[in-house]
Amino acid sequence: MLLKVTVSQWCSIYRVYQPRFISATKMSLEQAKQVAAYRAVDEFVTNNCVFGVGSGSTVIYAVQRLAEKVETDNLKVTCIPTSFQAKQLILKHNLTLGELDTHPVLDVTIDGADEVDANMTLIKGGGGCLLQEKIVASCSKKLIVIADYTKDSKKLGDRYKKGIPIEVIPMAYVPIKNKIVGLFGGEIKLRSAIAKAGPVVTDNGNFILDWLFINQDLDWQNVDTVIKMIPGVVETGLFVNMCQKAYFGQPEGIVNERSVSSS
Ligand SMILES: O=C[C@H](O)[C@H](O)[C@H](O)COP(=O)(O)O
């Protein structure tokens, strides 16, 4: 028997099932973040370690797991935050808060990423926290990335479409924008705030430019160096040769790993 469904019937079916589909997808994304975060914390947190706490939605699960382990295994861990958000998470979970003044060398930092390419080059800063993240990562013996499966890509720009974040001094954003486009092409947008009129202001009082690059085959180490030489640029969200290992949570709850040697 052929079942005839009219356009308006299709619309009703779509209206009923679409929210369920979205929430199932959202749930599997959250689950993917959680399994990746738990795995990384279980593998890298040891007693007496100095631990860098990254920023973003995936790191929330890492801090949850860390708090559990500190409690159950009676661990002593000093946590160095990479943002206001990270500091709040450390305090909320009653973990020991440290700073670079007293702990300039960290054993490990666990952080999220917006995209990880085949060479383990990262785009970070989708949440505006790239500067402190890069400082803390540069002081860490290891940088471990935790992410869901949507962040795993071959080339930068394959999956993350919002561009490379660049933190800049506010008075210089227009000339910086013109110089980067002149040097490497593409388009640059000043990031706008959502619950505030005007631009996003970072934890450090700066603006964020999002550079929508076109050429995916650029030498990212060189790009990073050249952009950082422009007066007024504070930091870029390109993390080149910094990350040793990445954990990608999958929708079905397993975790794929990639390390520098295996990429
Ligand atoms: O500025 C934000 C950070 O670089 C985050 O680590 C990055 O955006 C990934 O965040 P999420 O875990 O929320 O995807």
Image (cartoon, rainbow, N blue to C red):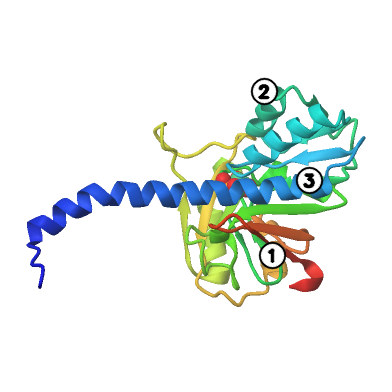
Three-letter residue code for mark 1: Thr
Residue that protrudes farthest toward the front in the picture? 1
Q: Which quarter of the figure is the C terminus placed in?
A: bottom right
* Distance from the alpha carbon under mark 3 to that under mark 2: 20 Å
Looking at the picture, how far across and down is residue 25, in whole percent? 43, 52
Q: Quadrant of residue 203?
A: top right
* Left or right: 4 in relation to 192: left
Three-letter residue code for mark 3: Asp
Query: What residue is shown at x 60% (from left), y 64% (from top)?
Result: 152
Is 189 drawn above or below residue 51 in the view shown?
below
Query: What residue is shown at x 56% (from left), y 63% (from top)?
Result: 180
Is 105 drawn above or below residue 36 in the view shown?
above
Circle 1 is placed at which residue position?
Answer: 121
Q: Mark 3–mark 2 contact, CB under 8 Å?
A: no
Looking at the picture, how far across and down is residue 249, in whole percent? 61, 56
Is 138 drawn above or below residue 262 in the view shown?
above
Looking at the picture, how far across and down is residue 192, in whole percent? 44, 43
Circle 3 is placed at which residue position?
Answer: 42
Eye-nearest disc, 3 or 2: 3
Which of pointers 2 and 1 lies earlier in the amino acid sequence? Answer: 2
Looking at the picture, how far across and down is residue 262, in whole percent? 77, 72
